[in-house]
Image (cartoon, rainbow, N blue to C red):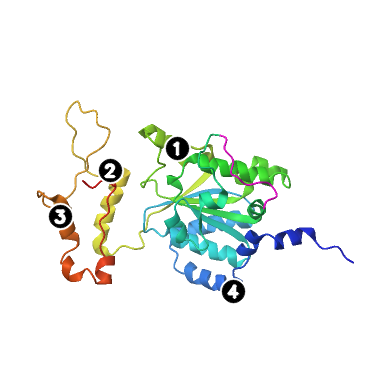
């Protein structure tokens, strides 16, 4: 009797690989063509660079920077559907659970890659050579990691070391290539929250960011600037928000001799509420107008929210 192909049997028994290969090729291709038709020039440039790296086996490392609304998630979906239509494996992950839900088949990075909670300079992911997850990573052609700036650089470095380690027995060159020669696309916005360091100072946060990693020297940087969501009347406000994030917004001059490191931003009067004795009540009344008459209206409720950067609202 002919002997069964052990490699094939191993793949068939690997539920991770089976799950990633279960996407319908024709359905993915149709969805990809629909998404591709709406890409702008900036997005097409990124799409072409990523696909060229995969098709030519270059194993490049990319970072996609863009403010909210510039179409990062839409571009991820376009790339993902293209790769799955080719019956290849792409692993979309994100630093937070909410962001992961926006990616087709997305998972949190810590869940997918078994990243340790207590990271050190030489940490490795908890992925054993020969395990199902290790075999999945070997078969993967692209890793997409959204909201990357909020994750400590040591998480990316741990993944880099781990993929090199599990890939090098079969491919000795993998030990000397970034992420073992896998194409990796990180994305996010450096204007938003950086890694949170418990009781850390400003320099601790900056040194923990991905652009302070040894990986960054090999990164190809892309920038999305065209906001795909905004109506005409919202563009002025969006431009001001970006100026705040870039540190270019108008500031209130500090008193002479002040040691404060935090800038105080000037805010136009039309964006402010008049100061009253009970400011919380004034804020709630301005956002939830006619609340008692409309609180049971689903559309009314879902169109309004009050966001606060702190749990303490007193």
Q: Residues within 10 Å of mark 3 (few under 14, many from 20)?
A: few
* Disc 3 element: helix
Look at 80% across and 61% down and name the residue there: 5
Residue at image position (58%, 63%) is 83
Query: For the residues marked 3 and 1, what is the alpha-carbon distance in whole angstroms?
Result: 39 Å
Q: Which residues are magenta?
A: 122-131
Counting from the top left corner in percent of width and height, residue 239 is at: 28, 53
> Which residue in the structure is indicated by mark 2?
248
- Mark 3 or mark 1, which is nearer to you? 3
Q: Is residue 127 magenta?
A: yes
Lower sequence index among marks 4 and 3: 4
Q: CA distance from mark 2 to mark 3?
A: 32 Å
Residue 281 place in picture, x, y as percent: 15, 55
Q: Mark 2: which secondary structure? A: loop
Label 2: how many residues lie within 10 Å, few (<14), some (14-19) or many (20+)? few
Q: Does residue 166 sit above or below 82 in this rendering?
A: above
Percent coordinates x, y for residue 13 in the rendering: 70, 61
Dot 4 surroundings within 10 Å: few (below 14), some, or many (20 or more)?
Answer: few
* Residue name at image x 41 percent, y 33 percent: 204
Q: Which mark is residue 208?
A: 1
């Amino acid at each position: 009797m002919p002997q069964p192909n052990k490699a094939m049997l191993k793949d068939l028994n690997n539920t991770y690989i089976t799950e990633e290969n279960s996407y319908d090729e024709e359905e993915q291709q149709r969805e990809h063509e629909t998404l591709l038709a709406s890409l702008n020039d900036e997005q097409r440039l990124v799409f072409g660079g990523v696909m060229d790296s995969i098709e030519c086996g270059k194993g490049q490392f990319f970072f996609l920077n863009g403010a909210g609304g510039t179409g990062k998630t839409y571009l991820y979906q376009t790339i993902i559907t293209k790769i799955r239509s080719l019956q290849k494996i792409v692993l979309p992950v994100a630093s937070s659970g909410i962001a992961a839900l926006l990616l087709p088949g997305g998972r949190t990075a810590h869940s997918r890659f078994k990243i340790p909670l207590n990271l050190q300079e030489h940490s490795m992911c908890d992925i054993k050579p020969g395990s199902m997850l290790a075999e999945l990573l070997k078969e993967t052609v692209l890793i997409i990691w959204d909201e990357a700036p909020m994750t400590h650089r040591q998480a990316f470095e741990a993944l880099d070391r781990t993929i090199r380690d599990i890939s090098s027995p079969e491919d000795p060159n993998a030990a000397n290539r970034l992420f073992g020669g896998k194409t990796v696309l990180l994305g996010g916005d450096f204007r938003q929250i950086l890694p949170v360091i418990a009781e850390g100072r400003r320099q601790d946060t900056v040194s923990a960011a991905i652009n302070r990693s040894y990986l960054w020297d090999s990164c190809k940087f892309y920038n999305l600037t065209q906001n795909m969501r905004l109506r005409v009347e919202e563009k002025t406000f969006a431009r001001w928000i970006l100026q705040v994030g870039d540190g270019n917004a108008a500031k209130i001059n500090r008193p002479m001799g002040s040691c404060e490191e935090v800038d105080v931003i000037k805010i136009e009067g039309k964006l402010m509420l008049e100061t009253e004795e009970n400011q919380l009540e004034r804020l709630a009344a301005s956002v939830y107008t006619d609340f008692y008459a409309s609180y049971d209206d689903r559309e009314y409720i879902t169109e309004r929210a009050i966001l606060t950067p702190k749990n303490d609202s007193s």
